[in-house]
Structures are given as C-alpha cells and as structure tokens.
Image (cartoon, coloured by chain):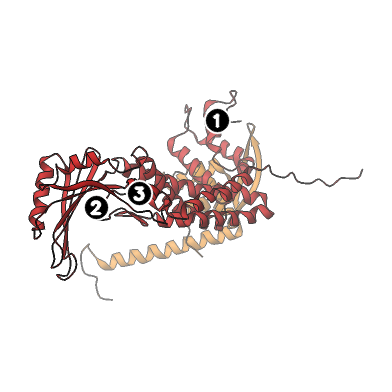
Chain colours: A orange, B red
C-alpha cells in the first residue's frame, strides 16, 4: 500500500472518531496537528475526492443547515485498515529512530558496536 | 449566480472563484464547498484570503484538466513545442517588421565603408544575392533582397598582394572604433597552409542600425589577399525580448488549446472525440517542417543561417520561408479551425423516449 501523505492521514484520523462535515474536518485536523496543518477548503475537497475514489471514505448523510447543504463523511472499512496500517508503520519507524539515537549517544559520537 | 446583489460580498466573491471548477462539479459540490468556505472564513472578512483563492483556482483547474485524458497531454506536449517554435518565429518577425526588405543602398554602403577600411575602395558597391529555389522571396536578391531582411551591400578594398591580414584586421578594428562603431570584434579562422585561402579574418561592428562585416582572406601561392566589407541591417534591439515572449506565449497557447479542445470534445462523444486526434495530428504535421527549419541556433534559424561570408544578423523566422514550409504552415490553420468549430458546435440534446399513459 502506498504511503499516505500527512494531510490525508490527518483527515482519516479526524474521521476515525465518527462522521464529520467539511468544516468540522478542517477544525479537527488543525486540532490534531496543534495548528501546524490548516487545510484550505479547496485542498480539503480535493483530498476528499481522492479518498472517496480510493474507497477510504464515503458519504455518511446530508443535512441542510441555515439553508446551506452539509455533507458528512465517514471512514470505510478500507479507510480504517489503511489508517491503522499507516499508524503502525509510523510507530515502527519512530521506535527505530529512537533506538538508533539512544545507541549513538551524544551528537557526533561514534555509534557503539552492536 | 456569482453576481447576485442579494448575496453578501464574501459569498459573491467565493462564487466567482468557484467558477474555476467545471460546471458539473460545481452543480454537485459547489453549494457544499461554499458552505464550508463561509463557515471557515474569519469573522468580518468581505473578500477571500489570497491563499484560499489560490487554492480554489489551483484545484478548480485541476478538476477541469482531470477530464482531459492521457492522449490530450501527449498532444499538448507536442503542441507546446511546435507552438513555442511558431511563437518564436512570429515574435522575431514582428521585431524585424520595420526593417526595409532590401539591403542598404549603395551610396550609404560606400560612405560607411570609408569609415571602416583604411585602404582605398576598389570599384563601386554591389549587391550580393542569388535566387534560390528554397527561398521564394529571393527573386529580388540581385537588388539586395533575400526575403529575410539579411541582404548585404558589398564593397571591396584595394590591398597589397601579400598584405598581412592580421595587421590589417586590427587596423580596421581601430578605425571602426574611432568612427563610432560599437561592439567591434575580430575573429580569425585558420585552415591548412595549403587550403585556399589558408586563413580568414572577420571584423564586425554596429552603428546607427547597420551591421558591417569585413572579411579578409590571406594570400596563398595563387591568389592575392582580399578585403570585402558587407553592410547589412543590424538586428532590431528588441528582437530577443520579442522572440522570447513569442516563444513562451506560443508554447502556452499551444498546450492550452490542446487541453481545452480535448475537454470539450470528450464531452461530445463518438465521432468528434475520434476527430480530436486526427485533426490535431494533421495540424501538427503540417506545421512541423516550418518549425524544425526554424529551430533557433547561434547563427539564426536552423535552415536560415545568415552568417555567410562573415557575421550576419540573427533572424529567427527564416525557417518559415523555406520552400514548401510556409504554405504547409498556412495550411495547418485549416484542421485547427475545424477543431475550434467542432468545439463550438452545440451539444446534441439527449433523445427522450415517449411514455405511454
């Protein structure tokens, strides 16, 4: 499975807790990334289109609020699996990097023999 | 509608930016995207943030191009290259438009030759030229016309049989600089001692819109030293910018035309979709000979080298006068116009099957 880009990973993570509409996804992504990733609406909907084409998300329901349409999205089973796989890969990579940094000691020191 | 005065300004402006998206996409997703844009806008804002607008434009155009198809990108790549070469030719031709067709007059050539040659003139100035089958505009070449405005008026100088062309070349260089000629350069091409001539020196400079090129041939066992000054029109100073702008514009227009016609014809279906490939193939094939002949080089166009008997002005549209290339290039407008007409045809209405009550 191809690696997921960070904005897509964050969108899937935002939807992991339950269906959300577009603006709620933008807010949740911003919260999950400590305000580092702020999705523009154009970028969000391009990502939602792509994730829908890849069968990772789907439309949950539609509502009308204050005369304007609101569409909620949810993770599919494929999307949940892809998110879990991506999270596991990141956890593995983070553990590997942490182990190697501990083994290297202070910066610039030669690595200790295995 | 984007310009409905009843809409708040911010909504009106967002609707305009949403026009970047294809119509079908706007119909399906436009209201939802607009709702999200308005919810996420900062309070008190009455126009979209620049970043937001740029993203809408970028993704909207991306959604349009997604309907183009892989073949369209191949056609667009070829159209960009050939459009760029055609644009280069057009830009260069426009910069040369005010330059006279024929070479400088003989009186001017004689007058300016005296500011260049430190030796007496040998005879009257003459126009060099020959009618060539490949250049349909060279009929007036005996009067200095060459069809690419690079005709030359030549004046010979009287020199000693065994003159030292190096010393003479540098004497010409000093004389030219003293008489206000600019960009004066001396180059020497050495050949085998038994070649005829064994060595040739060139001195060139520009002044008052003219380009003077002097060729000095070294003497050999059979022939004396010779010196010949050729007066030509200098390159227009805005030729580089016109040529570059034309090339960029041609490439962009070619690529956009290919993509836009593909998107419109894909929606038509059937014969018109198939016609897209054939019409573009015909257009590109017809314009290819002129474009290949017009590939820019350091001495002008690939097939129109104006560096003959010494330096000459660069002409970047000469390939389009090459025999046969010009009429084919003009003919390429026919399939191109057919493509544009096909894109403008009204879309056929879907047929309705009658229902029985």
Closer mark to the observer between disc 1 and disc 2? 2
Q: Which mark is residue B11?
A: 1
Q: Would you call the spot at circle 1 few (<14 residues within 10 Å), some (14-19), or many (20 or more)?
A: many
Separation of residues labelled 1 and 2 (CA atoms): 63 Å
Name the element at disc 3: helix
**Residue at the bottom extreme, as displayed:** A114
Residue behind mark 2: B311
Tell me if residue B97 comes above or below residue B163 in the rendering: above
Closer mark to the observer between disc 2 and disc 3? 3
- From the viewer's side, name the closer residue of A47 and B50: B50
- Please report the residue visible at 21 percent of the width from the left and 69 percent of the height from the top: A110
- From the viewer's side, name the closer residue of B334 and B12: B334
Cβ–Cβ under 8 Å for marks 2 and 3? no
| Disc with the residue nearer the chain's start (1 vs 3) | 1
Name the element at disc 1: helix
Name the element at disc 2: loop
Separation of residues labelled 1 and 3 (CA atoms): 66 Å
**Residue B106 shows in this picture:** yes
| Disc with the residue nearer the chain's start (2 vs 3) | 3
């Amino acid at each position: 499975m191809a690696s997921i880009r960070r904005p897509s990973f964050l969108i899937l993570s935002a939807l992991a807790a339950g269906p959300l509409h577009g603006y709620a996804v933008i807010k949740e992504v911003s919260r999950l990334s400590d305000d580092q990733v702020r999705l523009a609406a154009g970028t969000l909907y391009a990502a939602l289109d792509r994730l829908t084409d890849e069968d990772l998300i789907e439309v949950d329901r539609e509502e009308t609020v204050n005369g304007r349409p609101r569409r909620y999205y949810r993770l599919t089973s494929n999307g949940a699996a892809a998110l879990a796989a991506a999270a596991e890969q990141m956890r593995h990579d983070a553990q590997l990097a942490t182990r190697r940094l501990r083994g290297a000691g202070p910066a610039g020191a030669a690595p200790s023999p295995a | 509608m984007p310009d409905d005065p009843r809409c708040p300004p911010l909504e009106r402006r967002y609707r305009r930016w949403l026009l970047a998206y294809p119509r079908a996409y706007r119909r399906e997703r436009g209201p939802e995207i607009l709702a999200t844009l308005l919810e996420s806008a900062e309070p008190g804002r009455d126009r979209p943030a620049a970043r937001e607008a740029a993203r809408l434009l970028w993704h909207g155009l991306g959604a349009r191009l997604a309907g183009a198809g892989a073949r369209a990108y191949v056609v667009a790549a070829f159209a960009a290259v050939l459009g760029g070469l055609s644009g280069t030719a057009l830009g260069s031709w426009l910069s040369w438009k005010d330059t006279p067709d024929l070479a400088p007059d003989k009186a001017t050539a004689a007058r300016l030759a005296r500011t260049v040659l430190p030796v007496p003139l040998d005879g009257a100035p003459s126009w060099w030229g020959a009618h060539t089958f490949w250049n349909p505009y060279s009929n007036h070449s005996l009067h200095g016309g060459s069809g690419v405005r690079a005709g030359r008026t030549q004046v010979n100088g009287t020199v000693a049989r065994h003159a030292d062309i190096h010393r003479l070349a540098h004497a010409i260089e000093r004389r030219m600089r003293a008489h206000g000629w600019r960009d004066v350069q001396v180059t020497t091409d050495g050949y085998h001692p038994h070649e005829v001539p064994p060595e040739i020196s060139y001195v060139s400079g520009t002044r008052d819109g003219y380009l003077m090129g002097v060729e000095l041939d070294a003497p050999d066992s059979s022939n004396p030293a010779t010196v010949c000054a050729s007066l030509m029109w200098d390159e227009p100073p805005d030729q580089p910018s016109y040529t570059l702008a034309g090339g960029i514009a041609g490439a962009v227009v070619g690529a956009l035309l290919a993509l836009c016609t593909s998107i419109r014809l894909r929606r038509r279906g059937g014969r018109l979709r198939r016609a897209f490939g054939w019409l573009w193939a015909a257009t590109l094939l017809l314009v290819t000979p002129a474009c290949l002949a017009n590939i820019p080089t350091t001495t002008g166009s690939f097939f129109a080298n104006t560096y003959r008997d010494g330096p000459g002005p660069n002409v970047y549209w000469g390939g389009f006068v090459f025999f046969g290339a010009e009429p084919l290039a003009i003919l390429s407008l026919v399939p191109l116009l057919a493509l544009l007409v096909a894109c403008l045809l009204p879309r056929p209405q879907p047929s309705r099957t009658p229902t029985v009550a």
